[in-house]
Image (cartoon, rainbow, N blue to C red):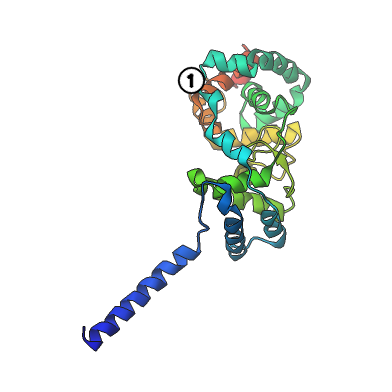
Amino acid sequence: MTKGGQFRTVVVAAMMAFAIAPGQASAAQCGNSAAGFEAWKSQFANEAKGRGVGAAGIAAIQGTHYNGATIGADRGQHGFRLSLDQFMAKRGGNTIAARGRALKQSNAGLFASIQQRYGVPAGPLIAIWGFETGFGAVHGNQHALSAVATLAYDCRRSAYFTDQLYAALTLIDRGLMSANERGSMHGEIGQTQFLPKNILEYGGGANLDTPSGALNATAAFLKAHGWSPGAGYQPGEANFAALQAWNAASVYQQAIAMVGQKIDGGDAAARR
């Protein structure tokens, strides 16, 4: 090879290295076991600093741990493979409907206010509230940030949960979420179990550990996903799509619609 050819080769190689290196440096490497989590965490913390995450958020990510229980839950969501009747029986759908009717009456002012603001009737909101946490009784006892960080590291859905992790760190920096917040297996928190990105988008700064904060945020989510006041929310009706946006599992969507209808009953106000 001539000296000129060697020079061109070196220049091309240098240009390629320059083009590739930023991409390689900008993404912490995902993994499929606990072995690489600590190295990933250090990489991610450096990236987060570069993206403007503050000291509180950086300290929080450094305090996370690999959550094997979260990985197990993410791999084995068997409840969503049940038939609708099986799901209703396992999750106590009829009990949720019965208690939901009582809660609708005892919190009539709250639900009237929510419906006036967002157009969402009580039934589906109460159904979601009941299925998610048993009306606030069971929020989960996982270290929420560790659950989200584990799923951001795990290769299966890394991109989706990386967005959730950045949202969580933003919430921590703003003082809207504790670094030691407890939640469910995937890092959902509050009475209707919001992931961090949804808290940022629909929480409005409210305390989602309270019924009012959680139910208003849930109604805001449904409205943002196309809820139309007065339209039905059963399968095939206009507002069922908003319930589909809430959870990807078909059986869960149907259960929310069924229990919501049992709660709303023939109430004309539910369709106004």
The extreme bottom residue here reads 3
Measuring from the top left, give residue 55's x and y in whole percent.
Answer: 71, 62
- In front here: 218 or 196? 196
Based on the displayed image, in which of its 4 quarters is residue 120 positioned? top right
In the image, what residue occupies the spot 63% across and 36% down? 185
Total residue callouts: 1
Three-letter amino acid code at the position of disc 1: Pro
Measuring from the top left, give residue 232's x and y in whole percent.
Answer: 53, 21
- In front here: 98 or 108? 98
Measuring from the top left, give residue 251's x and y in whole percent.
Answer: 52, 22
The extreme right residue here reads 106
Whether residue 268 is visible to the viewer of this picture, yes or no, is no
- In front here: 41 or 212? 41
Residue 15, above or below 185: below
Q: Is residue 157 left or right of residue 214?
A: left
Q: Is residue 100 left or right of residue 222?
A: right
| SS at mark 1 in the image | loop
Based on the displayed image, in which of its 4 quarters is residue 108 positioned? top right
Residue 214, above or below 53: above
Locate the N terminus by quadrant.
bottom left
Whether residue 210 is visible to the viewer of this picture, yes or no, is yes
Residue 41, above or below 142: below
Locate the C terminus by quadrant.
top right
Near mark 1 (Cα within 10 A), the count class, few <14, some 14-19 or many ≥20, is some
In the image, what residue occupies the spot 50% across and 63% down? 26
Based on the displayed image, in which of its 4 quarters is residue 214 positioned? top right
- In front here: 29 or 215? 29
In the image, what residue occupies the spot 62% across and 64% down? 49
Residue 94, above or below 150: above
In the image, what residue occupies the spot 78% across and 20% down? 106
The extreme left residue here reads 1
Q: For mark 1, what is the residue?
A: 235
